[in-house]
Amino acid sequence: MIGQALSAGKYAAFVWPAYGVSVLGFAWMIVDTLARAHRWRRRVDRLERSKEP
Amino acid sequence: MFSALANPLRFMAFSRWAAPLLGVLATGLIGSGLWLGLNAPPDYQQGETVKIMFIHVPAAWTSMLAYACLGGASFVSLVFRHALADAAAKAVAPLGAAFTAIALITGSLWGRPMWGAWWVWGDARLVSVLVLLLLFVGYMALRASIDDEARGARAAEILALVGLINLPIVKFSVEWWNTLHQGESIMRAGGSTLAPVYLTPLLLAGAGYAAAFGALWLERIRAEVWRRRATSLALRAALA
Amino acid sequence: MSVLTALLRRELALAWARGGGALLAVGFFVAATVMLPLALGPAPERLAAVSGGVTWVVLALASLLSLDRMFERDFEDGALDLLALGPLPLEMVSAAKCLAQWTVNGAPLAASAPFVAVALGARLTTAPMIFAAAALGGVAFAFLGGTGAALALASRRGGVLIAVVVLPLLTPPVIFGGAAVANFTAGLPWATAITLLAAYALACVALTPFAMAAACRNAQS
């Protein structure tokens, strides 16, 4: 099954870069989104803590 | 259901479990879709390049879904003056642009071995997606170039709605244009109906991409909500 | 009625005074079209084959000129606030501005288009169709361009930003107009294309003023 899945014959030069681009695109979306969420959540926590006393 | 999401606190509580859940769902759907798709036999006409269809078509579908969401969120924001809807609109654009870019690049790689050209103007969907990318870019450029956040949000909303109304016309015009140039237009490989051995993985991957978009969108809205809260907290601290 | 006439007269005068009026747009149009044979080589068949399409594209680009000053001057000197408070709704004011833009900018361009196309090698018999398509397309360009100009008001950036925002929206009229000219030239049925173009232009006239007025109000508050 793996053999069939990974065989792209003469089109390999097109198929695998296409998958690569998709992986990169997803990776960027995921990393950027999670980093943003993390950064701003930390900022809010820090600001809320500093205004307590 | 939407009124439950309208309240920011309820939204944050909802998205806290909904986003990861959608993420897991996406992984499962995309994984199974691609597994089946990669194992499908090479197409009669396309050979192994049919493997690209499973990552190109879902990306194109999702890019259009993203624009519909942009339009919807912009409409709600414009009509109900809801800050959360505006945050949702702002959050969608970069994701939509990314899916659009993925669709265009994979589409180009799919077209090259089949029709000998890196770009195929005869493909109505590809051209529509290109226009979609320009619409996303225009939206983000407009939003970024206006310093006043509230004004920028408003202008961007109006643009999103103008674009949304225009989009079906763009799609129609491109498809119609293709029927005119019948001689030069390209028949979609496999014809209009797709064999189940290809259709099932395609639908699975499509659903998976949509779920991934949903997860990422929710998470990005959360980030935006926190950003606004941080900004107002910092402002209050500075004025105190 | 007289209020509307006064407004139209004002907008026409402003549009004419703006950046050299029609001369600038037509000058740009001709200058840009000259680039094509210089780039492509003088082979007449090749030029003739693309003459319709190129004329159309450069026309769309030339329509973008002087767009940024459509609302900006009034916005900066406070006249827009007065217009907003005046007897005519802001939607109608916006429509009047676009109509003036088309009269001063779009119509002269439409008149020059057949000359330019024929110079590139298009057949003389196609001239009326080129004029018709350019005139109708120009209406769509003026109203959509006005929408971009109004949206960009809040950014003070104008120019390229308006172009980036407006160009994807111009896709349908460009396709319909281009198809009308191409089909007419090839002797194929062209009625559908020109009807679609006319319908699109009318839809722009009817709908975009609402977007423009909303965008103006957004920039004012």
Image (cartoon, helix red, strand yellow):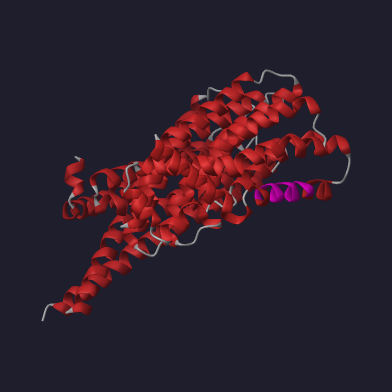
Residue C176 x, y percent position in the rendering: 60, 30
Query: Is A34 a magenta residue?
Result: no
Q: Is residue C52 visible?
A: yes
Q: Quadrant of residue C208?
A: top left
- Say whether residue C30 is magenta: yes
Report whether C100 appears left or right of B86. Answer: right
Instruction: Please determine whether, in this image, residue B69 is positioned above or below residue C133.
Output: below
Q: Which residues are magenta?
A: C25-34
Indicate left or right for B152 with B35 as reference: left
Residue C41 vs residue C5, the one in the foreground: C5
Q: Give residue B190's quadrant in the image.
A: top right
Quadrant of the snapshot with the N terminus of chain B: top left
Q: How many labels, in total?
A: 0
Looking at the figure, which quarter contains the C terminus of chain B?
bottom left
In the image: residue C192, left or right of residue C127: left
Of residues B125 and B52, the one drawn nearer to the viewer in this rendering: B125
Residue found at x 37% / y 57%: B152
Spot the residue most to the bottom.
Answer: A53
SS assignment for the magenta stretch, majority: helix
Q: Along the horizontal axis of the image, is B64 left or right of A40?
A: right
Q: Residue at x 20, y 47 (%)?
A: B5
Residue drawn at 83 percent across, 50 percent down: C38
Residue B231 drawn at (x, y percent): 27, 69
Does residue C97 lie above or below A28 as drawn? above
* Residue C165 in the image, given as x and y percentages of width and height: 50, 50
Outermost residue, right side? C43
Residue in the picture at 53% in, 22% down: B193
Residue C135: image location, x then y, percent: 61, 33
- Nearest the viewer among C48 and C95 is C95
Residue B209 visible from this viewpoint: no
Q: Residue furthest left?
A: A53
